[in-house]
Image: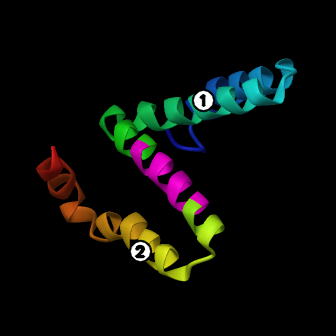
Amino acid sequence: MLFNSYVFIFVFLPITLAGFYLISKRKIQLSFLLCASLGFYAYWNPKYVFFLVLTVVLDFYVARAIFKTKGTSLLFGEKIHTSGPFYDHQSYDSWIFQIL
């Protein structure tokens, strides 16, 4: 799904905005947005959602460690982790499926 597609503009966006503003509790709103964003990416290619979730969880815990230790070595390592496999678009598929 692209941001300028009819599916996004007339289906996904109105449902997501309505759901967000109709939910009153902040924690449930954020959970709803998380599920909506995963649905958005799953619409494009469902096989990458697992890796998206894995990367988000890993980034979250590394960010907590960086905050606790105030260390820049973790930050450098995280940048390599996050951008490394995505740098070469052609080899991304082969790199990911070699892990599995």
The relative height of residue 61 versus residue 7 in the rendered view (above or below) is below
Q: Residue at x 85, y 25 (%)?
A: 21
Q: CA distance from mark 1 to mark 2?
A: 30 Å
Between discs 1 and 2, the one toward the N terminus? 1
Asked if the stretch drawn in magenta spans residue 58, the answer is: yes
Magenta span of residues = 54-64
Query: In the rendered view, does 50 fall on the left or right side of 22?
Result: left
Residue 46's disc is none
Q: Position of residue 47 (x, y in %)?
A: 30, 35
Q: Nearer the viewer, residue 68 or 57?
A: 68
Q: Residue at x 14, y 55 (%)?
A: 94
The answer to which image quadrant residue 54 occupies is top left
| Kind of residue indicated by mark 1 | Ala
The relative height of residue 85 versus residue 46 in the rendered view (above or below) is below
Query: In the rendered view, does 47 fall on the left or right side of 64?
Result: left
Badge 2 element: helix
| Kind of residue indicated by mark 2 | Gly
Considering every residue shown, the one lying at the far front of the view is 69
- Assess disc 2: are there few (<14), some (14-19) or many (≥20) residues with their C-alpha within 10 Å of its C-alpha: few
Q: Are marks 1 and 2 in contact (CB under 8 Å)?
A: no
Query: In the rendered view, does 45 fall on the left or right side of 32?
Result: left
- Which residue does the numbered mark 1 point to in the structure image? 36
Q: How is the image coloured?
A: rainbow
Q: Position of residue 69 (x, y in %)?
A: 60, 71
The answer to which image quadrant residue 82 occupies is bottom left
Residue 77's disc is 2
Q: Residue at x 48, y 80 (%)?
A: 73
